[in-house]
Image (tube, rainbow, N blue to C red):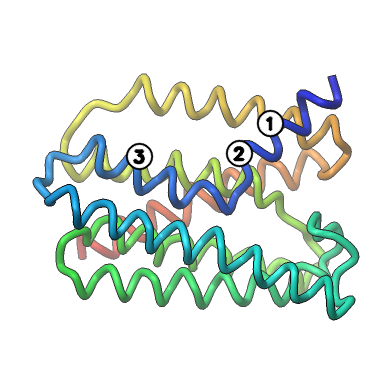
Amino acid sequence: MTLFHKFISYFFHPILLPTIGALFYFLLSPSHIPKQQQYIIILVIFISTYILPIILLIILKKLKLIRNFKLSSIKERKFPIIFLIILSFMLGKMLLKTNLVNLLAFSFFGGSLALLVVYILFIADIKTSLHTLGIGSLIGFIISMSLYYELNFTYLIAILFLLFGFVASSRLALKAHLSKEIYLGLIIGIFGQLSGYFIYNI
């Protein structure tokens, strides 16, 4: 069973979810963007939110600033979170300049805001599950798309909540987080995306 929980944790790792969110955007949105531009945007997002964070973690491990890639302690999480806050914000700005995927761009601003909340909670010695924050962000983004395009994504949102259950159970089974850290991640993730959506509408 532990192998299953590890598989879920690795397969739905938070740094993969921005790329998954971008794929959902292009699959579900009625916007007509040329395929070539879609591929370029997805590639840029994948490199920025998956490849660059992995390189950062490798460097931090080489410098012995982190023990492993799990980032178990708040101290180990601080610099990577700052890096991701800045990265998400810059990526949002870059996507906004294309004037092709504005809703997607604001989802990265929302992600940056969510990570900022996570960092602020470090001051109170509160750790948040980044796995459930990622799932929460994806749920919040699909809700935002549903509101913006006036499309019914109820079944997809229900499936994502079910997925949250699997991820949450796996993180608890692996003793990676407490229950409050799991639900905190979900709430902050959804909050960040809906905040980005409402700012976009304003």
Earlier sequence position, callout 3 versus callout 2: 2
Location of the C terminus (image quadrant): bottom left
- Residue 195 x/y as whole percent: 38, 58
**Distance Cα–Cα, label 2 vs label 1:** 6 Å
Residue that carries the numbered disc 1 in the rendered image: 8
| Label 3: which secondary element | helix
Location of the N terminus (image quadrant): top right
Residue that carries the numbered disc 3 in the rendered image: 142
Residue kind at label 3, given as amino acid type: Ile
| Label 2: which secondary element | loop
Q: Quadrant of residue 20?
A: top left
Which label sits on residue 12? 2
From the viewer's perspective, tell me whether residue 197 is left or right of residue 89. Answer: left
Residue kind at label 2, given as amino acid type: Phe
- Residue 131 x/y as whole percent: 65, 45
Residue kind at label 1, given as amino acid type: Ile
- Residue 87 x/y as whole percent: 49, 73
Query: Residue visible at 21% across and 58% down?
Result: 101
